[in-house]
Image: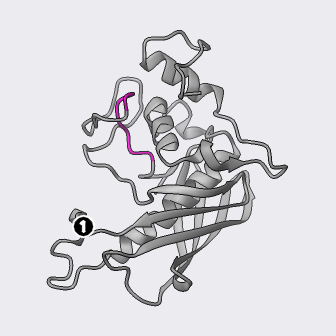
Amino acid sequence: MRTESGRAGIQQSADCERPVSLRGDQDGSIGVASVRWFWIDRFVEFESGRRATALKAVTNTEEQLEGYLAGFPVMPASLIIEGFAQAGGLLVGERGGFQERIVLAKVSRCRFHFEARPGDVLRYEISVQDIQSMGAIVHGTSYIGDRVQGEIELVFAHLDNRFAGVDLFHPDGFLCMLRLFGVYDVGRKPDGSPIEVPQHLLDAEAKANGRQPGAAAPSGQS
């Protein structure tokens, strides 16, 4: 996930089903290609501004395994890094209500101990080491079962005012992705209370679905 993740917020239409094509829109926002750039499946833990745990099942049905290493299907290391970045970027972005424009600036260090193969479930454990107005440092460890599969340190940057008014993602599609990942199902504040969907994302979703901003969402979307 780069950006609020660079690539993390795969943009889809409001119904979360039809992908949109790559384009620069008149409102200055950026659409993405008609491929789901999802490198985690769901969060199972999410503590605002502190830590998160996400899962990614590796299967033979995934296109990126086909032909990467002929006769020896493995999850490409670059896409495991994307999984770390996607989970970490969302953890950093949520702390500010997804108002900051966040990009992956640097992979400070990264080490893999063995491959992730079809049938494995990657467990990404992410923790925020430092977060300031300019960006954040995140540490991640991937596990398969009880074995440490990889370790990484990522640096995220907050884009400055030169990018004011430019949305990296369509907010309604971004909220759809957050719901698919279970952020608001398992997300908690440090005091244990549930994290809330930011109002600007709810308003964008309402507008995309033909409702007035601030109107109550249909059951199951609050």
Of residues 168 and 122, the one nearer the viewer is 122
Q: Residue at x 49, y 11 (%)?
A: 211
Q: Residue at x 54, y 47 (%)?
A: 182
Please provide the residue range marked out in magenta: 9-15
Pinpoint residue 77: horizontal percent, then vertical percent.
37, 77
Q: Is residue 5 above or below residue 129?
A: above
Inspect the image, locate mark 1, and give the three-letter code of the amino acid beneath it: Gln
Of residues 123 and 111, the one nearer the viewer is 123
Q: Quadrant of residue 63?
A: bottom left
Q: Secondary structure at mark 1?
A: helix
Q: Label 1 belongs to which residue?
A: 64
**Circle 1 crowding by C-alpha within 10 Å: few under 14, some 14–19, many from 20:** some
Quarter holding the C terminus is: top right
Q: Residue at x 77, y 48 (%)?
A: 189
Q: Is residue 128 above or below residue 108?
A: above
Horizontally, is 125 left or right of 179 in the view? right
Of residues 12 and 24, the one nearer the viewer is 12
Horizontally, is 141 left or right of 169 in the view? right
Pinpoint residue 75: horizontal percent, then vertical percent.
32, 75
Horizontally, is 94 left or right of 123 in the view? right
Of residues 140 and 5, the one nearer the viewer is 140
Q: Is residue 152 within the magenta segment? A: no
Q: Residue at x 39, y 45 (%)?
A: 10
Pinpoint residue 204: horizontal percent, then vertical percent.
51, 23
Which colouring convention does the figure follow? one colour
